[in-house]
Amino acid sequence: MPPQKTEGIILGSADWHETSKIVTFYTKDFGKIRGVAKGARRKKSHFSPLEILSHHSIIFYQREDKDLYTLSECQAQETFPDIRKDIRKVAYGAYLAELIEVVSTSEKNQPLFDLFLKALHFLGKKEDSEIIIRAFEARLLDLLGFGLGLDHCVICKKRVEDDSKFHPGLGGLICTHHPQDGIRISKETRKFLKSPGIKRVSSGTRKELKTVLQSSILYHIGKRLKSLDFLEAIE
Ligand SMILES: [Zn+2]
């Protein structure tokens, strides 16, 4: 494979041998990749600092081991200093990175890359961090093909009225007369989920969105993310 050029956001890194690093990127054109940055821990390294969440243009090529590439160039395009100076934003950013790491593969998914980058841009501004995360989670579920059924009951297919409940395992709303347990959600919560974005919501809706989205994500990925402990400690 000839050297490939793309852009990527750092999901994490680990030390490798004496002076190098293995860096995981979520890229625009190749999905998730892991690459060795040779000599990246030397003082005079030609790599710019490889910090989590920073957005780089990169050149990489294949090594003998299939899943690990060699990074020949990483040039930081954006490092998001406004996220790094706010501990809550750092915690939210770490959660986004862990979520992308868990749900992504080495298949190209440019809408997912774009969503990730956009969320980081919003997080770097003075926007409501919690709502940025909720909008990201709702859009992520859609992109992964786990969009929530919010118009029709996912059991009997009847159009749902205002009085309905949400079932994470079934992925949507169900009528109140079905015996399955569910989470009661308000009209405002349903409206947000149907068209997620950065908007003002009541504190009740905030709580409902968190419950609905995090239980849906937990259901699909099957494990609790480590970064949530850090996030909850800060909140
Ligand atoms: Zn029903």
Image: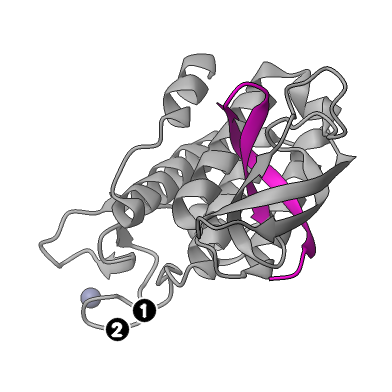
The residue under the point 84% across, 27% down is 45
Ligand 1 position by quadrant: bottom left
Q: Compared with residue 198, is residue 159 higher up or lower down, i.e. above or below?
A: below
Indicate the quadrant where residue 196 lies.
Answer: bottom right
Task: Find residue 152 and name its label.
Answer: 1
The residue under the point 70% across, 67% down is 29
The spot of residue 37 in percent (x, y) is 70, 38
Mark toward the start of the polypeptide (2 vs 1):
1
The residue under the point 80% across, 28% down is 49
Is residue 201 visible in this depiction of the protein?
no
Is residue 44 visible in this depiction of the protein?
yes
Point out the residue furthest to the left here: 179
Q: CA distance from mark 2 to mark 1?
A: 5 Å
* Ligand 1 within 8 Å of the CB at mark 2: yes
Q: Main secondary structure of the magenta part?
A: strand
- Which region shows up in magenta? 1-26
Q: Which residue is mark 2?
A: 158
Element at label 1:
loop
Q: Compared with residue 34, is residue 128 higher up or lower down, i.e. above or below?
A: above
- Determine if the magenta segment contains residue 17: yes
Q: Is residue 68 left or right of residue 132?
A: left
- Determine if the magenta segment contains residue 57: no
Element at label 2:
loop
